[in-house]
Amino acid sequence: MPALGTINFFEFSPAGDEVSLPSSRGVELWSTAPWERTRVLTNFSRPFLYAPDGRGLWLTNGLREAGLYDARTLDPRLLLPTGMLPLAITRDGRHLAMSIYGQRLQVWVLAAVREQFRGLGLNWSDGLSASARSGITVEPR
């Protein structure tokens, strides 16, 4: 099966057992052991980021919608407000750089964001929050 589009970026998973090939038309995920394509995500594109623990994927749907999704099931964990796109995450998972409408850069200290969410009864590491299940977007303060 041909590639989804021109590939000008790739990223290995934190464990090194998978590589993502995002393009303008989707994301191909390949296992590095047999070098076989394992999944094709046609509703997501670049930027594409693995969470440092490998359990989450920061995915972008279109140019303005993004969020943190469960790596195994693709269930949403944290949907970002329109116009916010994840650009990079530190290896230790402490900081996430976000593009705000392609005009500004915002860096989140993820421990602080998660602490605020815990105070609201939301936390993406504890499974899906009620807001993620209902499709409601949660904005950090």
Image: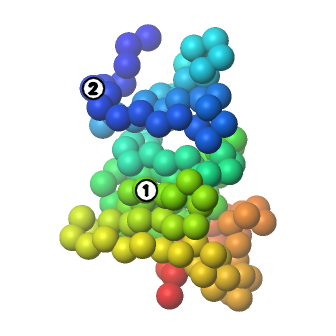
Residue 34 locus on image (x, y percent): 64, 12
Query: Disc 1 on helix, strand or loop?
Result: strand
How many numbered marks appear?
2
Q: Quadrant of residue 92?
A: bottom right
Q: Nearer the viewer, residue 116 or 39?
A: 116
Q: Residue at x 58, y 67 (%)?
A: 94
Count neighbours of disc 2 (C-alpha within 10 A) and say few if under 14, some if 14 to 19, many if 20 or more. Answer: few
Residue 50: image tag: none
- Colouring method of the image: rainbow
Residue furthest out toward the right: 126
Residue 6: image tag: 2
Residue 68 locus on image (x, y percent): 56, 58
Residue 35 to residue 40: above or below: above
Q: Quadrant of residue 13?
A: top right
Residue furthest out toward the left: 103
- Left or right placement of residue 82 versus residue 140 in this view: left
Residue 108 locus on image (x, y percent): 48, 74
- Left or right placement of residue 14 versus residue 108 in this view: right
Quadrant containing the N terminus in the rendered view: top left
Residue 11 locus on image (x, y percent): 47, 36
Query: Disc 2 on helix, strand or loop?
Result: loop
Residue 88: image tag: 1
Q: Residue at x 66, y 46 (%)?
A: 54
Amino acid type of the residue that numbered disc 1 sits on in the rendered structure: Ala
- Left or right placement of residue 106 versus residue 19 in this view: left
Q: Is residue 94 visible?
A: yes
Q: Is residue 39 visible?
A: no
Residue 90 to residue 36: above or below: below
The first of marks 1 and 2 along the sequence is: 2
Count neighbours of disc 1 (C-alpha within 10 A) and say few if under 14, some if 14 to 19, many if 20 or more. Answer: some
Please tell me whether mark 1 or mark 2 is closer to you in this view. Answer: 1
How far apart are labels 1 and 2 at the CA level? 21 Å
